[in-house]
Amino acid sequence: MKITDDLTRGNIRNQLLVLALPLILGNIFQQFYNTIDSFVIGRYIGHTAFAAVGVAGTIMNLFIFVINGGCNGISIIFAELYGERKWNTLRKESFLSFSFGCFVSVGLSIIGLLTLAPLLNMIHTPAEVRVFAQDYLQMIYLGLPATFLYNWCSSVLRAAGDTKTPLCILVIAMILNFSLDYLFIICFETGISGTAAATVISQLFASIVCLMYMKIKYSCLLFGRQDMAFDYRLLLRTVNFGVVSALHQSSLYIGKLFVQGAVNTAGTEIISAYTVTMRIEGFANSFGDSGSTAISVFVAQNRGAGKNERVKQGFRKGTKMMMFLSLCLSSIMVFATPGAIILLMGKASDGLTENVEIYMKVIAIFYILCFIGNSFVGLYRGLGMVHIPVLGTALHISIRVIFSYLLIDKIGLAAVAVATGMGWIAVVIFQSILYKRGQVTDNDTCYS
């Protein structure tokens, strides 16, 4: 049985790079789902619909990152079991996590549909924007189970070190999404709901292909009839890791939802400007999120194998890699902003352009802190200390929301950038204090 490279031996730096690169590309292509929708909507439907997809994206990501975060947490259990070579337990975990995730994703679809109108009102969505956002989100919510299935398959493969296959499947799905967007909007004139339908169909396609590939190539990672048994301790651990990791991811987007509420009070032009910045930042964040995931998988496998020294070395080398990436991306974001505005919206107003450019210049100053924070998140997740990232995120979003509301009327969209940077400063200080106190690096009980 050949699965993927063993992360418990070999060159650490090369393994982190090989593990992270497909994750980075995969996250970038995942960003294309929303960016393609924004591109097509901005050019063929109008600026109001473009603003709506920005509002919808903030709400939609709250639900999607509950799913994504839960799958990330579960992948840590998979990686540990893979490092320990406990194949029977791994397949039981496959059954329990799949069943639990299906139940949660269906529940999220129902909750999303029931809370859609009140949520749009709560964040002060303008009436002309609300109509478009509601049409878009109704379709997205119906497709949440497909989103879970793809993320679950990716997490299982990723835990074993295979990050290339989900990437290849995602590229094909992205091309399908782009083609369907044009088909539905230009040929069938379905409006903004057509772009959402294209996204759901593409996600469903990726899910089915990924599951079929796993069935053929990696059946040892999938549960069979003999594995469909209730294991209370394993289920409790699955729920704990899944829920806490989902809470970490979703709490960040709860904060973004409140920030979106502050932005919405400033009018449609500022909403459109914020939508542009989110699309640009989404690509930069793909690198940080992927690096964090690579570190967590590496740490979890080596923790499972009892190789604590490799855990420490992996974190240090991973952090250096992340810092270098952040410096490169900060420069790219600033210089690429004018072209990104034109690409997404065509001709934009002077006010919108000015807000976007100021925001990106301010946020770029703080990006190295964002990536250092992501490195710590990868370490803590891999060690099973999943509650630490939750506390850090709660600190970050509290600062971000408070100062966004306090400053939005005074300095415009730059307020969100300043508030976000202040939040990152606080989080890195918090994480560094824990690290320097030796609660991670020197205390072997952290690895048990």
Image (cartoon, rainbow, N blue to C red):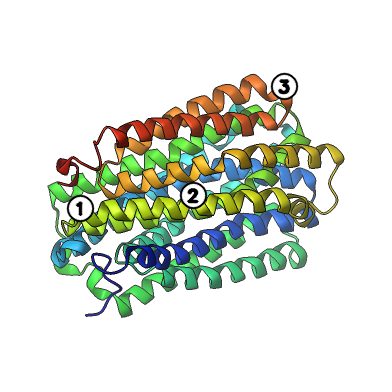
**Circle 1: is it few (<14), some (14-19), or many (20+) Cα within 10 Å?**
some
Q: What is the spatial separation of the Cα atoms under label 2 and label 3, in whole angstroms?
A: 33 Å
Residue 283, position as x, y percentages in the image:
59, 54
Instruction: Identify the mark nearer the N-term, 1 or 3.
Output: 1
Q: Which residue is mark 3?
A: 409
At 32% from the left and 40% from the top, the residue drawn is 244
Can residue 103 be seen at all in this image of the molecule? no
Q: Dot 3: what SS? A: helix
| Total number of numbered discs in the rendering | 3
Drawn side of residue 427 relative to residue 272, left or right: left
Classify the position of the N terminus by image quarter. Answer: bottom left
Give amino acid for label 2. Met
Q: Dot 1: what SS? A: helix
Q: What is the spatial separation of the Cα atoms under label 2 and label 1, in whole angstroms?
A: 23 Å
- Considering only vertical position in the picture, is 430 above or below 48? above
- Residue 201 falls in image quadrant: bottom right
Q: Which mark is residue 323?
A: 2
Residue 6, position as x, y percentages in the image:
26, 70
Instruction: Identify the mark nearer the N-term, 2 or 1.
Output: 1
At 27% from the left and 51% from the top, the residue drawn is 312
Q: Which residue is mark 1?
A: 308
Give amino acid for label 1. Asn
Q: What is the spatial separation of the Cα atoms under label 1 and label 3, in whole angstroms?
A: 50 Å
Give amino acid for label 3. Asp
Residue 34, position as x, y percentages in the image:
61, 54
Callout 1–callout 3 Cβ contact below 8 Å: no
At 41% from the left and 71% from the top, the residue drawn is 210
- Considering only vertical position in the picture, is 206 above or below 69? below
